[in-house]
């Protein structure tokens, strides 16, 4: 996707313009489903209409920019760390959603992020994350009486 | 543990309770109370106050409070109904606001799915006007609304909340069209109060606690409370006593999960009964300025159903719920 | 001069050893929770209420005040060091502050934040004791139309955060406005852009968006470029402390930040975020070193930090004089007063002067304590940046998610954080400015609801915006601010031709 000097049209820029257009459509569609209109003020529809219209204009603006190819130059992208970090976040979300607990999820996130930034001692990092998470968990539940999502590990404490 | 063995175990517990160990069984209770709101709000404070009293007085062995905030309690109740089915050690704090929120949010889970246990506290709504307003009492306010509902602007809490419902009921009782009221929702109590003090609106409506110090300082004039009779803490007759048929209260209550056994329900109700009578709870109510409105058993079940029906009627009339 | 006599009396209450201790506990707790995104002073006070009930009123209210001020300090520390604003009011600080930290100037950034907070907090607390009764009259006379006009001024001024390309800046702003639509519309009670997901009904939390865009987005971006561009963090480059030059560039922004923060904070719907952005925009416009903005300009830290602390003091004006809680923390402090049977408001000053003035005096003390505590810590905090990069970023992500989980333990909230992180990454990659998204989310809903309230009260007559003198003045200022750059540019060109 990196723009080469020969081809001036920036495909990524066009995608951005398209996404904005889709968002504008989404806002407009959502607006048409509003039923309750306030009798005296402008009502809930005006702001979505303004936002939607302006997003269309901005999509056009971004589109023109992309056709002219005047988006700033971009470096090549290393996908591996992104996948690792997002994977860690997804693990955390899944664990909390499914009742696996906060401590395990946090430890995994710590380890994957650390791996994404080039460390190779996954197990050590996992343990560091585990200790960190346990500390935080105890601090929250004992000091502030705030219960973080619990799983099997948390019940042991 | 299989469902069967779980049931067996519960049966044994229930048998023990029936065998006259009611109190000791309750003392073994390890309660979990859900506040379907963020820490700090009214429901959370209620849950944490219960926690304090139940564990101090030994009614329950341990009490844990969890917060599940969001959408006026819609998220909390969904989780409560789906995940705690048949668990006799769980309670959820709720209140009148949830009745309206579930309706306006079109929640798939309803209060009918829970097991009502007890109503705990209540707060009456108060209608106030700025001190320099020409409106002196409820009759004059009613007359103004009847003349032109658009010109009487109300400041209160969120749309569809208890303040909004009370304002609509007032208009209806005054003989005006409740869909035509000019009700302006504000995000926080402070913001609404500022608008009333600044004379930006005709009247304000909220729990009396929000207005009390301003009324006492003479900056706001109290038109009346939404109680049946004049209460001891105010000098003004209630709105109903002034001839406008409006009675509404913002109560808080606890409910248990669906599918609990009769014995479990009784154990929870007994625990609440004991809590409500305890000196600790009474002191706490005084300290928080909450009015005791304790009601349990079938009386509360019926009351809850009535409130749901009436609220649905009002919200439909105002147009916030499309039937 | 009555105020001074009362204040002196208040000081005697505040410096009792027990009360000093409460103030110390308060500022420590406040700093600790202020550091955590998502957990703010309001939550802390809420959780401590049942515990403090047994303490004496003066002590616990003094402690709450310490938590409040401490929270404002703590929020800026993480904003500067790890680009994770602990409070929404620390967002503007993160913009330049984190750039300074990355350039090895974290020490001066933290110092100007701490000293600026102290200066602003002291001036604003003085303002609170002397001007509260007068200010509050003005504050209450602010109607919805006036707030709307204030938002217009804010929109015009924050365009300074847009960066070089107006199209990209506006795109960011409108993404923020779109996000501001999500949730239940307060005026009509129906949900917009929520698609039946109940978790979306409560609007998008500003801290979730900011932490997602700033912290998570940055982690993704830095990680994806490691193979080309190894980021080297040096905790200290040059002086750890503020140089003479830093002082010279900081003191005026401190004062201007205070001038924004205190009065806007005193407005019932003013808040602490708007003054910080106004201050940031002003400093960016007035600075003698425009080339530093975008690379870590100390003015961009000094101003907003002073503004958010002054706003915190401002919030106490309506709370103490009227009993009006205008922020979540103020609402909790009100609950704190009420549990002792005290009702803040017009009568409190007359009934319990010892308590009110004791509280005000302890604000001065809390402020001084925070300065004394924070300055020596600067060296230690900056060392945080010396942590090996993998652990530093892993820690940042743990930190960011933990705050979100603690405030709202729902997977949906974490999904939002992740999505905002991806958005922040893409925006960095395609060079869209990030601050306008947050600005749009904060200002959009307020502007919309206030305009609709104003029109509801006037029964749809838009002239209400010009009939109110406050609103008319503010709109005029906005107009001037909008046109002035063009006129000045024109004049400049005219002069150039003359020469």
Image (spheres, coloured by chain):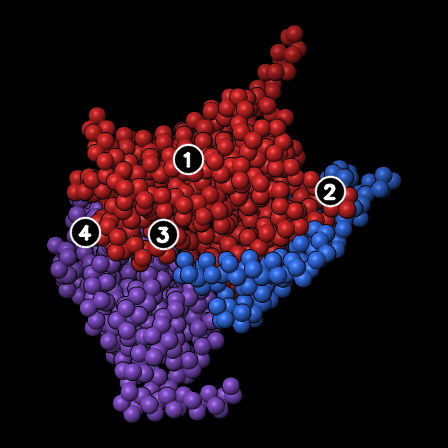
Chain colours: A blue, B purple, C red
Q: Quadrant of residue B271?
A: bottom left
Mark 2 and mark 1: span between their CA atoms?
A: 37 Å
The subunit letter for the residue under badge 2 reads C
Kindly indicate whether the residues beneath marks 2 and 1 are on one polypeptide chain: yes
Q: Do dots 3 and 4 share one subunit?
A: no
**Which residue bears the numbered disc 1?**
C372
Q: Are marks 1 and 4 in contact (CB under 8 Å)?
A: no
Q: CA distance from mark 1 to mark 3?
A: 23 Å
Spatial CA span between label 2 and label 4: 67 Å
**Are the residues at dot 1 and dot 3 in contact (C-beta closer than 8 Å)?**
no
Residue B312, given in percent of the width and then of the height, sits at 36, 69
Of labels 2 and 3, the one closer to you: 2
Seen at 50% across and 65% down, the residue is A149
Q: Is residue B85 left or right of residue C458?
A: right
User: Which residue does the numbered mark 2 point to in the structure image?
Assistant: C230
| Number of the front mark, 3 or 4 | 3
Q: Mark 4: which secondary structure?
A: strand
Per the image, the residue denoted by label 3 is C45
> Mark 1 vs mark 3: which is more N-terminal?
3
From this viewpoint, is residue B202 visible?
no
Residue C351 placement, left or right of A115: left
Image coordinates for residue C160, horizontal then vertical, percent: 57, 32
What kind of element bears circle 2? Answer: loop
The residue depicted at 26 percent of the width and 71 percent of the height is B57
């Amino acid at each position: 996707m990196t723009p080469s000097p020969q081809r001036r049209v920036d495909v990524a820029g066009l995608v951005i313009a398209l996404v904005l257009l889709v968002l504008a459509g989404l806002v407009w569609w959502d607006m048409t489903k509003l039923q309750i209109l306030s009798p005296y003020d402008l009502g809930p529809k005006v702001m979505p209409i303004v936002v939607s219209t302006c997003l269309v204009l901005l999509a056009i603006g971004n589109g023109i920019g992309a056709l002219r190819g005047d988006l700033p130059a971009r470096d090549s992208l290393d996908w591996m760390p992104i996948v690792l970090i997002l994977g860690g976040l997804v693990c955390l979300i899944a664990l909390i959603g499914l009742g696996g607990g906060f401590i395990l999820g946090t430890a995994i996130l710590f380890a994957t992020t650390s791996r994404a930034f080039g460390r190779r001692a996954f197990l050590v990092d996992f343990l560091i994350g585990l200790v960190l998470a346990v500390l935080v968990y105890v601090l929250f539940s004992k000091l502030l009486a705030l219960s973080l999502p619990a799983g099997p590990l948390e019940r042991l404490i | 543990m299989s469902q069967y063995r779980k049931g067996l175990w519960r049966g044994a517990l229930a048998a023990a309770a029936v065998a006259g160990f009611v109190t000791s069984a309750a003392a073994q209770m390890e309660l979990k109370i859900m506040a379907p709101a963020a820490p700090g709000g009214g429901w959370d404070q209620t849950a944490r106050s219960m926690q304090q009293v139940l564990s101090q007085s030994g009614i329950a062995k341990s009490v844990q409070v969890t917060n599940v905030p969001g959408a006026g309690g819609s998220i909390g109740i969904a989780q409560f109904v789906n995940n705690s089915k048949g668990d006799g050690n769980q309670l959820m704090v709720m209140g009148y606001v949830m009745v309206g929120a579930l309706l306006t949010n079109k929640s798939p889970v309803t209060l009918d799915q829970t097991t009502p246990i007890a109503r705990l506290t209540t707060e009456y709504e108060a209608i106030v006007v700025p001190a320099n307003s020409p409106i002196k009492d409820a009759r004059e306010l009613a007359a103004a609304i009847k003349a032109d509902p658009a010109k009487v602007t109300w400041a209160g809490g969120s749309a569809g909340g208890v303040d909004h419902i009370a304002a609509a009921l007032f208009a209806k009782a005054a003989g005006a069209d409740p869909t035509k009221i000019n009700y302006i929702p504000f995000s926080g109590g402070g913001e609404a109060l500022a608008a009333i003090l600044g004379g930006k609106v005709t009247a304000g409506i909220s729990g009396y606690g929000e207005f009390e110090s301003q009324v006492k300082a003479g900056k706001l004039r109290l038109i009346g409370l939404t109680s049946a009779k004049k209460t001891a803490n105010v000098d003004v007759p209630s709105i109903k006593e002034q001839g406008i048929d409006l009675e509404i209260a913002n109560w808080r209550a606890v409910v248990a999960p669906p599918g609990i056994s009769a014995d479990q329900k009784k154990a929870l109700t007994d625990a609440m009964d004991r809590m409500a009578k305890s000196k600790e709870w009474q002191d706490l109510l005084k300290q928080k300025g909450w009015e005791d409105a304790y009601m349990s058993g079938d009386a509360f079940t019926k009351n809850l159903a009535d409130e749901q029906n009436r609220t649905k009627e009002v919200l439909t009339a105002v147009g916030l719920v499309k039937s | 001069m009555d105020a001074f006599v009362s204040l002196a009396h208040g000081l005697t209450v505040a410096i009792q050893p027990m009360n000093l201790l409460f103030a110390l506990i308060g500022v420590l707790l406040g700093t600790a929770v202020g550091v955590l995104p998502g957990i703010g002073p309001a939550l802390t006070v809420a959780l401590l209420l049942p515990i403090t009930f047994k303490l004496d009123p003066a002590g616990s209210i003094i402690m709450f005040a310490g938590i409040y001020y401490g929270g404002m300090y703590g929020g800026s520390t993480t904003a500067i060091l790890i680009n994770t604003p602990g409070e929404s009011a620390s967002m503007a600080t993160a913009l330049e502050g984190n750039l300074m930290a990355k350039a090895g100037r974290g020490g001066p950034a933290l110092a100007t934040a701490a000293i600026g907070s102290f200066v602003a907090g002291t001036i604003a607390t003085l303002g609170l004791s002397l001007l509260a009764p007068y200010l509050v009259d003005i504050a209450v006379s602010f109607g919805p139309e006036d707030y709307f006009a204030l938002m217009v001024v804010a929109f015009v001024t924050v365009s300074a955060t847009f960066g070089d390309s107006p199209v990209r800046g506006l795109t960011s702003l409108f993404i923020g406005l779109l996000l501001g639509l999500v949730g239940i519309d307060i005026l009509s009670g129906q949900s917009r852009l929520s698609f039946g997901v109940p978790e979306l009904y409560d609007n998008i939390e500003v801290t979730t968006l900011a932490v997602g865009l700033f912290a998570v987005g940055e982690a993704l971006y830095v990680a994806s470029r490691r193979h080309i561009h190894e980021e080297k963090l040096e905790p200290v480059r040059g002086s750890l402390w503020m140089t003479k030059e830093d002082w010279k560039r900081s003191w005026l922004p401190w004062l201007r930040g205070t001038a924004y923060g205190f009065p806007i904070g005193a407005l019932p719907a003013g808040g602490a975020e708007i003054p910080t952005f106004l201050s940031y925009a002003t400093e960016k416009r007035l600075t003698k070193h425009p080339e530093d903005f975008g690379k870590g300009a100390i003015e961009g830290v000094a101003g907003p930090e002073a503004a958010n602390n002054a706003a915190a003091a401002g919030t106490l004006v309506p709370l103490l004089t009227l009993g009006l809680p205008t922020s979540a923390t103020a609402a909790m402090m009100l609950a704190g007063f009420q549990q002792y049977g005290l009702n803040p408001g017009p009568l409190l000053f007359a009934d319990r002067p010892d308590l009110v003035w004791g509280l005000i005096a302890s604000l001065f003390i809390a402020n001084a304590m925070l300065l004394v505590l924070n300055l020596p810590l600067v060296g230690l905090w900056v060392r945080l940046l010396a942590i090996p990069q993998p652990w530093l970023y892993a820690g940042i992500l743990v930190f960011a998610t933990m705050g979100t989980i603690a405030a709202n333990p729902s997977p949906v909230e974490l999904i939002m954080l992740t999505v905002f992180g991806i958005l922040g990454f893409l925006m960095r990659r395609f060079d869209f400015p990030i601050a306008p998204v947050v600005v749009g989310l904060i200002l959009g809903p307020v502007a919309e609801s206030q305009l609709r309230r104003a029109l509801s009260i006037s029964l749809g007559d838009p002239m209400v915006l010009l009939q109110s003198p406050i609103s008319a003045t503010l709109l005029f200022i906005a107009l001037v601010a909008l046109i002035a750059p063009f006129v000045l540019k024109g004049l400049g060109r005219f002069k150039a031709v003359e020469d």
